[in-house]
Structures are given as C-alpha cells and as structure tokens.
Image (cartoon, rainbow, N blue to C red):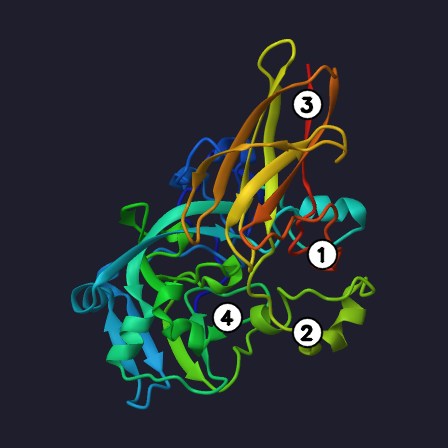
C-alpha cells in the first residue's frame, strides 16, 4: 500500500490557482476556461484526496471481480487491442463547484472552490458496456458497479472508491468509458492516467482516477467517498456531529443541477458591456438558452450560444449589450430543453455541493 508521500508528484500547471498543495487541489479562472471549447490540459482542475502517482501503461493492470469467472486481469494493451475505441466530449465537474459562493451564505465544509472546477474534454477509451458484454455480465436487479483505486492513500479511507448502477454501465448510449486518452493525448497522471472512469452526466466524484479494480456487487460501494461524502443533507444539518447519523439516510449524488456561470463582464466601449460564460446541463435535458440581467431580474437579455458540446458537454455563451451604469452586477440563468430554469438561489447544505443559484459577475468602467 502506498504511503502519504507527496515528494514524488509530477509538476502541476502554473495556470491553476492553488487551493491546497497536500493533497493538490487547484482550479483555473472561469475567464480563462471560456476561451476554449475543449479545455486544454493546463486549465483542467486538479481534485485529489491524496498524493498524485505516476504509472506506466506496460505495467498497469485492471482487475474485474464478481463476473462469475474468478478475477479477470486486463492490461492497458489488452483493452486497446481487444475492444473498439470510442471517443466522446463530456464535461467533468466537481460537486463542490461554486462552493465559495454557498459558503458566503453560511459556512460550509470543503475546499472553497470558485467556478473553475469544470473541464470540457474529449475522452477516448473502451465502453464499459462492451467489456461487460464480452465478459457476459448481464443486467441484475439493484446491482452496482464499484470502481476502486488502490494506487494511493486517501485522507478519509484506505483507498478511493465509488459506484454506479450496473444498469447505467450496461446502457451503451450512456457512454460510460474506461478512458486512456484525453484530448487526443495519453491520459496524464494528474488526471488519472493511465486509466480512469468516465461517467458522462455524473459528478466527477464517480469518475475514479487511477482505476485498478472493478467489482460487480449487490450493493453500492461502501467507501467513505460514496457513503459519507458527496451527499446533499438537509439545510437544518449545520455541523459534522449532527451529520453523522444522517449519512446513511440520504442517497449518494449522481447528476448535478442545471447551472451557469458569468466568467467575465467588461466594457468594450463607453456604453457597451461584453459578458461571457458557460452553462452546464442538469438531469432533465441539455442547455437550450442562457439569459443575463443587469437589474436583478427585472429585465432579461438573451445571449448567443457560441458552442454546445453535444449530449454531455458544456455550453459557451456571450452577449454584448448597452449599459449606462458605472458599475454593478450581472446575473445569468440557464434554461434546458425541458423548460426548467436555473433558480435564483441555491439550497445551502453542509458540504457545499450542487450550488446553482444564478451566475454572478461584477462590472466597472
């Protein structure tokens, strides 16, 4: 078992704002992110619960358990040669995105993330449904797929674990991948290389990095990060002690809500304000429109959608509008294809997760 040794970590991007070094937690600015449809590696946030480890393809092994055939060991080379590769565009986002804003309402527990813990990337790998079909893993009532990484110790458990329903893994159109490439390059150590799980539409906590074990199970992962973290507790729960008896009573998070962020707002002339940002789909459909307001919702202005990343990606938007104010606030709200609208206020919770109140930015001449 690896030790909590941070001395061998690879260098990290200097374009990231460091929230913590041991373990490394860092994010770019939203203003930098929205300049790219596909997020370059130097701007992809780093979220860790322990040291970053480097591994080599030719020595790395994935073990599948619970398939009824004993343990099955697969090398990266076997995955690449035995199964058709598949590439998707999907947005990876941390459950704690915009936690700093929620923490301004009332203190929360967690890394004080701003709005940079999201990345829209191209992911390439093997569909988990293809692997399971080859292993003759069939649908089972209430079964789960547990993902584990024993590569490095974690702050709260001896390994990192998470799970998803087996039904989601078997559904080909849900594009669950065992990824070995990101943005047409081998997956780097900081982002889970040589193998990580991609679960499009789910929060990043389920996209296990440095994946080395898959278990077919009759129950969810019992790991700390599935059972006692990344859950939305009632607003009445205000401290860790009162949360203890409630973790088991609330479901593990899966999909994050419809969201939008104002990345920047700046004057490009004496009267013309330029506003740009991103939006993220929720569980009820992709982003259909984004609007902004500079008068706290009295008047809403449509924006231009510059880019939409398909079924699983983010949306980039911008607008130029006449504004005579010297300074002020600009808010954004997204609307999805089912007609749902981003709420004005997010619901406070102890862990500061799933914040999706109107996006907010400031402007000044």
Query: Label 2 belongs to which residue?
Result: 250
Query: Label 1 belongs to which residue?
Result: 109
Label 3 Cα crowd, 10 Å radius (few <14 / some 14-19 / many 20+): some
The Cα atoms of the two marked residues, 3 and 2, are separated by: 40 Å
Which label is found at residue 363? 3
Q: What residue lies at 59% left-to-right and 46% top-to-bottom?
A: 335
Determine contact: label 2, label 4, CB under 8 Å. Answer: no
The Cα atoms of the two marked residues, 1 and 4, are separated by: 20 Å
The mark lying in front, picked from 1 and 4, is 4
Q: What residue lies at 63% left-to-right and 73% top-to-bottom?
A: 251
Instruction: Give SS at disc 3.
Output: strand
Determine contact: label 1, label 4, CB under 8 Å. Answer: no
Query: Label 4 belongs to which residue?
Result: 162
Instruction: Give SS at disc 4.
Output: strand
Residue 331, how many percent across, how many down? Answer: 68, 35
Task: Looking at the image, tell me whether mark 1 or mark 3 is earlier in sequence order.
Answer: 1
Residue 328, how many percent across, how many down? Answer: 74, 24
Instruction: Tell me if I can see residue 133 in this picture.
Output: yes
Task: Looking at the image, tell me whether mark 1 or mark 4 is earlier in sequence order.
Answer: 1
Say if 265 sits above or below 98 in the image.
above
Instruction: Give SS at disc 1.
Output: loop
The mark lying in front, picked from 1 and 3, is 3
Label 4 Cα crowd, 10 Å radius (few <14 / some 14-19 / many 20+): many
Left or right of 154? Residue 82 is: left
Instruction: Tell me if I can see residue 176 in this picture.
Output: no
Out of 182 and 287, give the one closest to the viewer. Answer: 287
Residue 270, how many percent across, how many down? Answer: 64, 9
Q: Quadrant of residue 210?
A: bottom left
């Amino acid at each position: 078992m690896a030790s909590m040794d941070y001395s061998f970590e690879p260098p990290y991007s200097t374009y990231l704002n460091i929230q913590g070094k041991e373990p490394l937690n860092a994010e770019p600015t939203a203003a930098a992110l929205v300049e790219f449809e596909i997020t370059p590696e130097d701007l992809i946030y780093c979220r860790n619960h322990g040291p970053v480890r480097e591994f080599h393809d030719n020595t790395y092994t994935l073990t599948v358990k619970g398939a009824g055939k004993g343990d099955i060991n697969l090398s990266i080379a076997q995955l690449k040669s035995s199964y058709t590769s598949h590439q998707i565009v999907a947005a990876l986002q941390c459950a704690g995105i915009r936690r700093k804003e929620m923490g301004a309402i009332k203190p929360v527990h967690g890394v004080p993330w701003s709005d940079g813990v999201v990345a829209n990337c191209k992911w390439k790998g093997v569909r988990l449904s293809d692997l399971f079909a080859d292993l003759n893993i069939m649908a089972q009532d209430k079964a789960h797929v547990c993902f584990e990484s024993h590569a490095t110790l974690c702050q709260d458990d001896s390994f990192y674990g998470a799970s998803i329903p087996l039904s989601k893994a078997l559904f080909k159109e849900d594009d669950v991948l065992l990824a070995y490439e990101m943005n047409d390059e081998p997956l780097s150590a900081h982002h889970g290389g040589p193998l990580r799980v991609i679960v499009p539409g789910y929060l990043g906590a389920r996209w296990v990095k440095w994946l080395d074990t898959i278990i077919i199970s009759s129950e969810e992962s019992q790991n700390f990060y599935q059972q006692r973290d990344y859950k939305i507790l009632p607003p009445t729960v205000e401290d860790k002690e009162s949360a203890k008896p409630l973790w088991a009573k609330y479901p593990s998070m899966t999909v994050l809500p419809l969201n939008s962020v104002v990345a920047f707002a700046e004057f490009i002339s004496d009267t013309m304000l330029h506003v740009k940002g991103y939006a993220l789909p929720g569980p009820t459909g992709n982003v259909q429109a984004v609007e902004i307001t500079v008068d706290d919702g009295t008047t809403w202005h449509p924006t231009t959608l510059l880019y939409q990343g398909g079924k699983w990606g983010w949306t980039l938007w911008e607008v130029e509008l006449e504004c005579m104010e010297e300074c002020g606030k600009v808010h954004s709200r997204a609307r999805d294809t089912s007609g749902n609208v981003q709420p004005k206020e997010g619901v406070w919770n102890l862990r500061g997760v799933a914040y999706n109140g109107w996006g907010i930015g400031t402007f000044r001449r």
